[in-house]
Amino acid sequence: MKAARNLVQRLQTRTIASPDELLIKGLIPPDHLAAVTEASKTLPISITQHIGELIDPALPEGPIAKQFVPSKLEINKQEGELIDPIGDIPHSPLPGIIHRYPDRVLLTPLLTCPVYCRFCFRREAVGDGLLGAGELDAALDYIRNHSEIWEVILSGGDPLILSPRRLATIIDALDKIDHVAVIRIHTRVPVVEPKRISDPLISSIKRQTPVFIVLHCNHVEELTSEAGRAIAALVDEGIPMLSQSVLLKGINDTSEAMANLMKKLVRCRVKPYYLHHGDKAQGTSHFRTTIARGRAIVAKMRGHLSGLCQPTYMLDIPGGHGKVPAAENYIRAENEGGWIVKDWQGNTHKYRD
């Protein structure tokens, strides 16, 4: 774990990494300290300097604060919430690999993020973890030995906090695998630590194999001028960018908030891709809306927003059955708050709001 410790040391642009620091900066009241300390045992606290500057202590319910400042509500675990809500574990044949769909695979070279979103569905897994050299070699061998894999998705953790040299080593290895046609990188870095998007980092990404970057972004306030410059630096080098957002109660669960986000993304040359319904991770019920509300927001956007700004509203079926569009032909109401969901293989599953 020495490499993991070194990685953490390189991320010391964090301004807040403990409950006591939250208290000192006035981001939580004193009577929340014990609950927030308990919550941080499951999901660590990490807030970059850039994000810290966007948080107004006078607005604890603001869209930035709510995403990154722990809440005492996180210790409330509801019936139906899961440690592994989307079923990563059954589809992980070895460390660093999640192989859920035949033609694509997740490669997770690290579990560390520059910030920890309080609604994270991998909250039980993320932290100061990095694949060792032997584990990474084994993961790459798995991809080499499975010729059905067409796309490799780098996730984690956040791959763009790796050093340019280590990131280049991984992408070079993937670039040499004939059956890997596309590499996709999921990241929050351009909006939470935009200064990391440097020329060496961009050079480490560009290869003969097409590389797409999927930006995780949930509110228009994340798209600061600094974030815009980081995004432009990537797009100007010919790296296509898509976005992935999560529908979050009290943050973006209105048609106006969602429209503002999607329009700003497109203006930044980022194509909206997925809008995820909140996963049933333990301690996240205060973030989740209902499917009916999500559908209403998306329906209103359809009539009032350019097609360029339309994400696909998705539900990840609890238990590892994959994601499906949250549309009528995939999801139908069974009763009040109850739904029947059809997965990509035609199997049906019950889901409750």
Image (tube, helix red, strand yellow):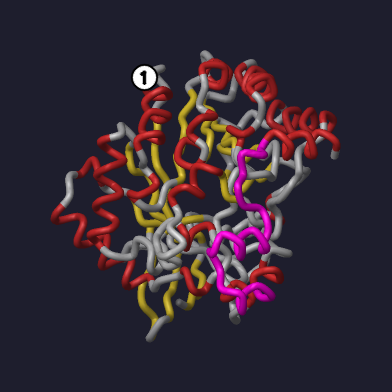
- Residue 313, picture quadrant: bottom left
- Asked whether, in this view, residue 256 is left or right of residue 248, the answer is left
- Asked whether, in this view, residue 17 is left or right of residue 226, the answer is right
Q: Residue furthest bottom?
A: 336
| Residue at 70% in and 36% down | 109
Residue 260 on image: x %, y %: 25, 51
Q: Nearer the viewer, residue 76 or 325?
A: 76
Work out whether 76 lies above or below 243: below
Magenta range is 11-35
Residue 327 among those drawn in magenta: no
- The answer to whether residue 300 is visible is yes
Mark 1: secondary structure = helix
Amino acid type at circle 1 is Asp
Q: Nearer the viewer, residue 320 or 17?
A: 17
- Asked whether, in this view, residue 279 is left or right of residue 13, the answer is left
Residue 19 among those drawn in magenta: yes
Residue 35 on image: x %, y %: 66, 75
| Residue at 33% in and 49% down | 220
Q: Which residue is mark 1?
A: 236
| Residue at 53% in and 34% down | 185
The quarter of the image holding the C terminus is bottom left
- Asked whether, in this view, residue 65 is left or right of residue 122, the answer is left
| Residue at 59% in and 53% down | 116
Residue 12 on image: x %, y %: 67, 39
Number of residues whose C-alpha sits closer than 10 Å to that of mark 1, classed few (under 14), some (14–19) or many (20 or more): few
- The answer to whether residue 77 is visible is no
